Image (cartoon, rainbow, N blue to C red):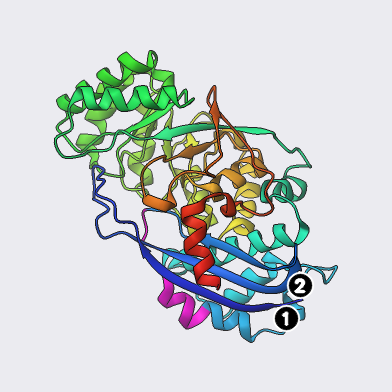
Amino acid sequence: MKILDIRETAIPLRSQLANSSFDFTEMTTSVVAVITDAVRGGKPVVGYAFNSTGRYACGAQMRARFIPRILAADPKTLLDESGDNLDPAKILACMMRREKAGGHSERSIPIGTIEVAVWDAVAKIAEKPLHVVLAERFNGGKIPAKVFCYVGGGWYTPGQTIKDLQDEMRRHLAAGYTQVKMKVGGLPLDQDVKRVEAVLQVMGSGTNLAVDANCKFERNEALAYAKALAPFKLRWFEEPCDPLDYALTAELASVYAPPLATGENLFSTQDVENLVRFGGLRAHDIVQIDPPQAYGITQYSRTLDMLARHKWPRVSLFPHGGNQMSLAIAAGFGLGGAESYPGVFGDFGGFADDARIEDGFISLSQRPGIGFEGQAGLYKIMRELAA
């Protein structure tokens, strides 16, 4: 078997949302289709992925370097030992040929998006859900039936009132979620504290609420927010500062007792190792790597191996993304949970149309692969790319 073609297109998110640092009005994402000559159910197997949200489409690098390298390779060199399926590790190595060390985000996102699409094809060829394939290979065959899932919300929107914010959180609770995350840093500290207090009136406990500053703060503001938020004992305080400012992260960890969270803007195993070496993080802090943006699932497994050597518990890992890719990864590797973005990011947010949340957990689909076929709006975009 072999890969016949790899296609990419850029799609605008068409979102007016804003966090503390930027809005999404110009945001795009790359959608990838890996077309194989394998046939299942009378149809050619096509693997799909997109490069998550928060980073722009990266098709130029795909078309100039990574797709040509795969298509030029001897197809036999990209297969697993059985010769009946693709080998994502070999395909990752093929894409990395003639690439200089460092400079990760320039290539980690296009490579990771293609690599995750390869995994979708691998699971479809095996006729299994991707989370099952990952559990068999990377988690001792422990296949969960459901995964803890929190909801990301509390965005800054024009004209939003405190009541609007509380009503949003009530809708999330009614939908079955038990933990929510909201944005901070987009208003002065005293106003953000009032927003947090208002949401806590709905959620009942700080353990049910996380906040996300989206890397907004310099040292003085980060420390001021940490001091103001500490009494609430929140589930976590996410990305208070620049993701590579390990010294400030360590300082915050030394004065802020509840959990911190970071990692979605780290794109290599070495960056994450530097975080746990020098960032002062504790075992109850949360690491939020986004695998499609960080070289993909194969490299994510290597990052997990590195974290295990540092005695880091998998329960403290929540992959960023809020989509079916991150859900399959959280389930397959046995991580702490997944996030969800219902009703935002257009067709790229949320899970399958028939997904249900109950008591904070989402049941897992048995569709082969990642399961994009159960997400009608997104699958329409993907199907048209492959057609």
Q: In which quadrant of the rendered view does residue 195 lie?
A: top left
- How much space separates mark 1 and mark 2, taking CA atoms? 7 Å
What residue is rendered at 71% in x and 59% in y? 124
Image coordinates of residue 156 in percent, x first then y, are 22, 38
| 348 left or right, relative to 18 | right
Q: Is residue 47 visible?
A: yes
Q: Secondary structure beneath disc 1?
A: helix
Image coordinates of residue 81 in percent, x first then y, are 83, 68
Magenta span contains residue 169: no
Q: Which residue is mark 2?
A: 79
Region in magenta: 54-65
- Label 2 crowd bin: few (<14), some (14–19), many (20+), radius 10 Å: many
Q: Which residue is mark 1?
A: 75
In the image, farthest residue toward the front? 42
Q: Is residue 364 above or below residue 176?
A: below
Q: In which quadrant of the rendered view does residue 342 lie?
A: top left
What residue is rendered at 41% in x and 77% in y? 60
Image coordinates of residue 2 in percent, x first then y, are 72, 77
Image coordinates of residue 307 in percent, x first then y, are 60, 44
Q: Nearer the viewer, residue 114 or 273?
A: 114
Magenta span contains residue 56: yes
| 252 left or right, relative to 115 | left
| 90 left or right, relative to 360 | right
Q: Nearer the viewer, residue 134 or 220?
A: 134
Q: Nearer the viewer, residue 179 or 386?
A: 386
Q: Amino acid at mark 2?
A: Leu
